[in-house]
Image (cartoon, rainbow, N blue to C red):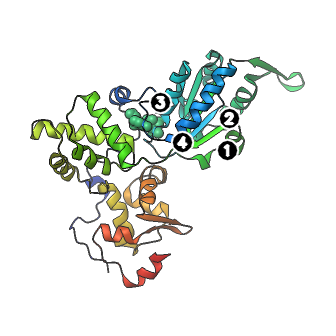
């Protein structure tokens, strides 16, 4: 049986504090303030930026709109941000919406008809578009036109209405859930990667300047190392720690102050919070390391399977705490070690694969 060393046992969701800084919805005023507006301010994702710069230059020279683009990757990595940066760099306007807001065909048609040449249309969570909306998009993306059916029965006619030459940018956390025909209509498809600690440190320093907060070199290094590779988390942590520094000290974020704040926030040296550790403990304590099916994990943590897959898992997978197998999720030896559990001897071989 596994041994628990930190005395912090698995807790049901209601006992967990909401300290995760991982909410996926916008904190508008804060995020708008600190959101980069140009390629120069957009840190990291070097390969993506280089490809985009070339595409933008070519499009400008040909005086044509950019190819339709799809960005995918976990929440908070900069999909929305890069989209508005692109529009800015093209000197164009961007209309932002999300698939769940386009439930009725007329919502999407209205937006498409109002676009001007070279405008951008950004659709967030594009994997959630319904079939009808998708079918409106196909001719819009391919021929810059909308097909409207007029009349009924034998007299049915399809009317082609031209619209502006625009660029669609789709963003999704789940590229795999996009229908094939829709995916095929994007000229540029790009996955956003987790950020290195050096990149996160740059982001933290930039945000600190905007927030008018003082942060030392080793303070920003510590915050970067606990940001789970994600700019949104880095910024939110910085904001919380800034508050802590103002209340508990002279406002300067030093390594020592940050360490104390992280202790209070229950965020460990890998940036895992109570929810992450609960997930790992569930696998280890209740299921001998797994494999455990996603539904079981979701039910035990009081979350839906989508949130587990899109929000919790990407970083735990990337950092090597869990692995995905056809029969479910398994805790890795790294997870056992990190949480202070003894690796069961039968498990050692099993986990080695
Ligand atoms: N490359 C980057 N450089 C600097 N800040 C970034 C970068 N990417 C994201 N951010 C910050 O992180 C926040 C979340 O980014 P966002 O584009 O909303 O993520 P996503 O749309 O992928 O969920 C933004 O408010 C922005 O300030
Ligand atoms: Mg977004």
Mark 3 or 2, nearer chain start? 3
Q: Quadrant of the N terminus?
A: bottom left
How packed mark 3 is, by other alpha carbons closer than 10 Å (few <14, some 14-19, many 20 or more), is some
Q: Find residue 179 and name its label.
A: 1
Q: Secondary structure at mark 3?
A: loop
The reply to whether the C-beta atoms of the residues labelled 1 and 2 are less than 8 Å apart is yes
Numbered-mark total = 4
Mark 4 or 1, nearer chain start? 4
Q: Secondary structure at mark 4?
A: helix
Q: CA distance from mark 4 to mark 3?
A: 12 Å
User: Compared with residue 59, is residue 22 higher up or lower down, i.e. above or below?
Assistant: below
How packed mark 4 is, by other alpha carbons closer than 10 Å (few <14, some 14-19, many 20 or more), is few
User: Compared with residue 304, is residue 161 higher up or lower down, i.e. above or below?
Assistant: above
Mark 3 or 1, nearer chain start? 3
Q: Find residue 134 and name its label.
A: 2
User: Is residue 64 in sight in this rendering?
Assistant: no
Q: CA distance from mark 3 to mark 1?
A: 31 Å
Q: CA distance from mark 3 to mark 2?
A: 31 Å
**In front of the other: label 2 or label 4?**
4
């Amino acid at each position: 049986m596994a041994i628990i060393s930190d005395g912090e046992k698995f807790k049901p969701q209601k006992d967990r504090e909401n300290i995760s800084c991982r909410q996926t919805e916008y904190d508008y005023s804060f995020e708008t303030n600190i959101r980069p507006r140009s390629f120069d301010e957009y840190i990291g994702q070097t390969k993506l930026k280089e490809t985009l710069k070339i595409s933008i230059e070519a499009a400008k020279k040909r005086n044509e709109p950019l190819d339709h683009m799809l960005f995918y990757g976990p929440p908070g990595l900069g999909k929305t941000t890069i989209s508005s940066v692109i529009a800015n760099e093209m000197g164009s306007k961007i209309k932002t919406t999300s698939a769940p807001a386009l439930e009725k065909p007329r919502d999407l048609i209205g937006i498409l008809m109002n676009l001007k040449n070279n405008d951008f249309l950004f659709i967030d969570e594009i994997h959630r578009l319904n079939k009808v909306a998708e079918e409106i998009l196909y001719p819009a993306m391919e021929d810059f036109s909308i097909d409207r059916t007029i009349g009924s029965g034998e007299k049915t006619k399809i009317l082609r209405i031209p619209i502006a030459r625009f660029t669609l940018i789709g963003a999704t956390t789940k590229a795999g859930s996009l229908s094939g025909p829709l995916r095929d209509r994007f000229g540029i498809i790009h996955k956003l990667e987790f950020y290195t600690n050096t990149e996160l440190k740059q982001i933290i320093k930039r945000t600190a300047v905007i927030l008018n907060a003082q942060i030392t070199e080793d303070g920003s290094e510590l915050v970067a190392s606990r940001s789970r590779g994600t700019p949104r988390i880095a910024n939110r942590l910085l904001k919380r720690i800034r508050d802590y520094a103002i209340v508990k000290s002279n406002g300067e974020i030093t390594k020592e102050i940050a360490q104390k704040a992280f202790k209070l926030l229950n965020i460990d040296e890998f940036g895992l919070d109570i929810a992450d550790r609960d997930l790992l403990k569930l696998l280890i304590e209740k299921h001998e390391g797994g494999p455990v099916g996603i539904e079981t994990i979701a039910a035990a943590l009081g979350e839906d399977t989508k949130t587990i897959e899109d929000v919790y898992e990407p970083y735990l997978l990337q950092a090597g705490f869990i692995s995905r197998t056809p029969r479910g999720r398994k805790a890795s030896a790294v997870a056992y070690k990190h949480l202070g559990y003894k690796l069961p001897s039968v498990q050692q071989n099993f986990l080695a694969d």
